Image (cartoon, grey):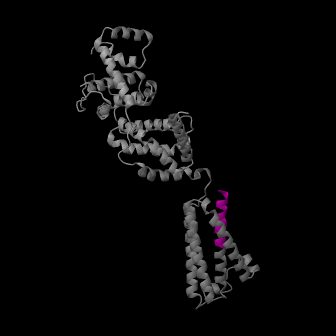
Amino acid sequence: MPRQVLEETLTADSIAADTALAQSGDPSAFERLYRTHVARVHTLVRRMLDADEADDVTQDVFIRAWQKLSTFRGESAFGTWLHRLAVNVVLARRKSIGVERGRFIPDDAPIDAASGKPVTLELSMDFEEALARLPEGARQVFVLHDVEGYRHDEIARMLGVVPGTSKSQLHHARMALRRHLDR
Amino acid sequence: MNDIWINRLSEYLDGELDNEERAALEAHLATCGQCYATLGELSQVVTRAKALQNTEPATDLWPDIRARLMPARDTRIAPAPARSRRFAFTIPQLLAACLALVMLSGGVVWMALGGGARRAPFDNSANEPTPPPEFRTVSNERWKVQSDMAIADLQDALTLNEGKLDTATVRIVRQNLAVIDRAISQAQRALKRDPGNTYLNLHLANTMRQKIDLLRRANALAGES
């Protein structure tokens, strides 16, 4: 068995074991799950919400996960389940603070504050900065589709819009990011 | 940028156009350098998005999470209290019991303070209350020993059963037992000064019986839960 496959298998087994232990009430096992997944959850939250909310909402995600562990049946990977739960917490947070949903970026809307530099791997923070400056609706769709890999029909259900709106938001987000990165 | 196809480039990139639309767009791309270049840029954006790295939070959030989840964990792990019947005395019932016992206790104090020096009106044999049947048929010492044993057994049982009663009931039962114990203690002290006082003996017997009744009732409630 190739080393990478072996490591992935062991990691999956370890997560499954920790999930079972956490379900039985073992906080140490849950802490290991937290350590394994916090970066992905925190990054998702930071990209979908304002950065200054990321810590609080990430905590909420893990608290919610702990409370709902008994509902995890192992039908998907724990990480997938946790990620979906994180998305739900984020979207609930958006609703609770009354952020307008579904705004479009005008075709010529600049993202002036983000520095215009060529797309290169070492300039990822600039891409992140440009992403953070997208309007909420476009940013959420872009993160869910292009970063997290959700389909438009899934995004539409989550956001309460029609798939066409999701597609349109995604295109505007890509166009805005492209223009910014082209400067 | 006003090209009608420009807004379909993302759908094309994601493979969401039907065959006819895709063929038409590809024909357009063959002749429109701007759309072709834009498509390349959008593709770069998608590639870049997939390559974004996750980053840890700047501070360790676990201590706060742990502090918050421990109460939640206790709630989740603890046996579901809602599933078991839990009994509680009504507050008026318990307050009435407390008041009655306090008055009873006060009467004993009054007797203890005044009864030794001068006969209370109750000492008049004509006015003497009728002893309870047990008291008439069993000698004082034997009855007290039996009562003490019964109380000890019931208290042991209640100690084991307290977990089945809700917190408010346990608290009020304990308060009532404390009031009864004070009444018993006062009666016993008064009897040391006047061992032959019939009323004090009857009062002690009644108070101990009340304690037994209360312990039995509390254990019965716990047993039903």
User: What kind of secondary structure does the magenta stretch mostly adopt?
Assistant: helix
Image coordinates of residue B85 in percent, x first then y, are 62, 54
Q: Quadrant of residue B106?
A: bottom right
Picture residue at 57% right of the left edge, 48% below the top:
A24
Asked whether B10 or A154 is in front, the reply is: B10
Image coordinates of residue B168 in percent, x first then y, are 54, 61
Picture residue at 45% right of the left edge, 45% below the top:
A35
Residue B137 as seen in the image, left or right of residue A24: right
On screen, B192 above or below B98? below
On screen, B222 above or below A127? below
Residue B213 in sight: no
Residue A84 part of the magenta-drawn span: no
Q: Which residues are magenta?
A: B209-225
Asked whether A42 or B162 is in front, the reply is: A42
Picture residue at 36% right of the left edge, 48% below the top:
B59
Residue B222 as seen in the image, left or right of residue A72: right
Residue B223 part of the magenta-drawn span: yes
Asked whether B217 or B78 is in front, the reply is: B78
